[in-house]
Amino acid sequence: MSMPVQTLTPITLDAGRFSIVRCANCGATLDDRTARATCPTCGGLLAVEHLAPELSGAELRALFDDRLGVSAYRGAAAERSGVWRFRELVLPAAQLDEIVSHPEGNTPLLARDAVAAFAGVRDIRLKHEGHNPSASFKDRGMTAALTQAKRTGALAVACASTGNTSASLAAYAAQAGLPAFVIVPEGRVSAGKLAQTLAYGANMIRLRGDFDDCLELTREASERLGIYLVNSLNPFRVEGQKTIVLEMLQQLGWEAPDWIALPAGNLGNTAAFGKALREAHRLGLIDRVPRLLAVQAAGAAPFAAGFGDNFATRRKVRAETAATAIRIGDPASWDRAVDAIRFTDGQVVAVSDAEIFAAKRVIDGCGVGCEPASAASVAGVRALVEKKVIDPGERVVAVLTGHLLKDPDAALATRVGGGLGSEESLSRDEALGHLGRVLAEPGAR
Ligand code: F0G
């Protein structure tokens, strides 16, 4: 049975145009080839709106499922991408030959008994975004942002970053042939991320300040110097990141889970997930909306505090957490994220660094692994099961946002809260004796 054609957003456009950009604050509209990351009239956050595809939910699902059959080895990168598979909902006007794609996406949905036991729910899947080309979810937004940078004729691209956005930007800018500038907080970015950013050829400034200072400076520099800003304020980043949700729904046979848990810092991803779910529901891709669970580190939790008073005021904090990726005190996508939590009847929770590292040890210990910030999603699920907000029988997807090797220091066994394995420095003879003793221990594997 075919469902009625749904309208995504009631917009009218000139022939040949598919999208417009609208300010969520003052309503001003911009052409879809705009190079502005924020509203030129009021400085508000922009959102991209697409003309709805003239297909029913069932037809759209069939289109997206058909594209899964495209060979992994042939065809344009964009045709093999887990972002551009959903191109009608990402950037319908983009031509295959102008898309800057690695490709990216196509990340696995994993189930591990040890994680389920730790979290306290029977059915928890891990959507592992660390399997992207630069090893974090940022590549999904970056392919869209760099495609847009090329469409607008940008001469250079820039971002502020806690490390993953900069690594991803550096990789995609290299592919697009554009100079990349990244501003990161001095002494606060993990080794893996710094190494990637430099290796891919970006110009890096280590600012004596925190991420919030970096973002303020980057916004000012892009305003004054006309460099294209690709932080998650950029509405095209949001369009790409929506595909984390679209792809997981597709992997679940378009049966929505009860909850989707994700770590939350600058709130770009929370905003993208809300937009994806709103659109997926409106287009008939899913018939029920999962609840979002945004998880912050307790030392960097202005959004969790805001949730406590129903977001009566916008809050800022001086952020501190060992999960450096989400060490952010003044999240840029606050308003969009509030909308996402309200629309999905979501929850926001703060977890301590100890809880984050406890979850990380379980995720690492079953051979999956993730960086510290990513483990916040699983820690948040456990916290809400304990509070009896999540029922053990509900179906949960927890997003792992970055790969274990992003932060090798955090995984070393010698570090407090580090890996489960053991290390010994031994001579050849000592090593043989040691192996024999360990194997003879009860419970040795
Ligand atoms: N997880 C990881 C691994 C991240 O790198 C980030 C953000 C988040 C979660 C939070 O996502 O900001 O959309 O709420 N990293 C940014 C960066 C800030 O610069 O790499 P968010």
Image: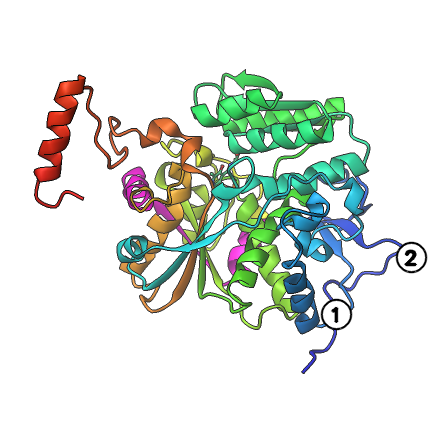
Asked which secondary structure carries label 1, the reply is loop
Q: Is residue 367 above or below residue 61?
A: above
What amino acid type should be assigned to the residue bearing mark 1? Leu
Q: According to the image, label 2 marks what residue?
A: 15
Query: Where in the figure is residue 61, as x and y percent of width and height?
Result: 65, 67
The quadrant holding residue 439 is: top left
Q: According to the image, label 1 marks what residue?
A: 55
Does the residue tagged 2 have its C-beta within 8 Å of any atom of ligand 1? no
Mark 2 or mark 1: whose residue is earlier in sequence: 2
Q: CA distance from mark 2 to mark 1?
A: 18 Å
The number of callouts visible is 2
Q: Residue at x 40, y 36 (%)?
A: 404
Q: Is residue 340 magenta?
A: yes
Query: Where in the figure is residue 300, as x and y percent of width and height?
Result: 41, 37
**In the foreground, 431 or 181:** 431
**In the foreground, 270 or 316:** 270
The mark closer to the camera, 2 or 1, is 1
**In the foreground, 401 or 298:** 401
The magenta stretch is: 336-363
| Quarter of the picture holding the C terminus | top left
**Left of 66 or right of it: where is 372?**
left
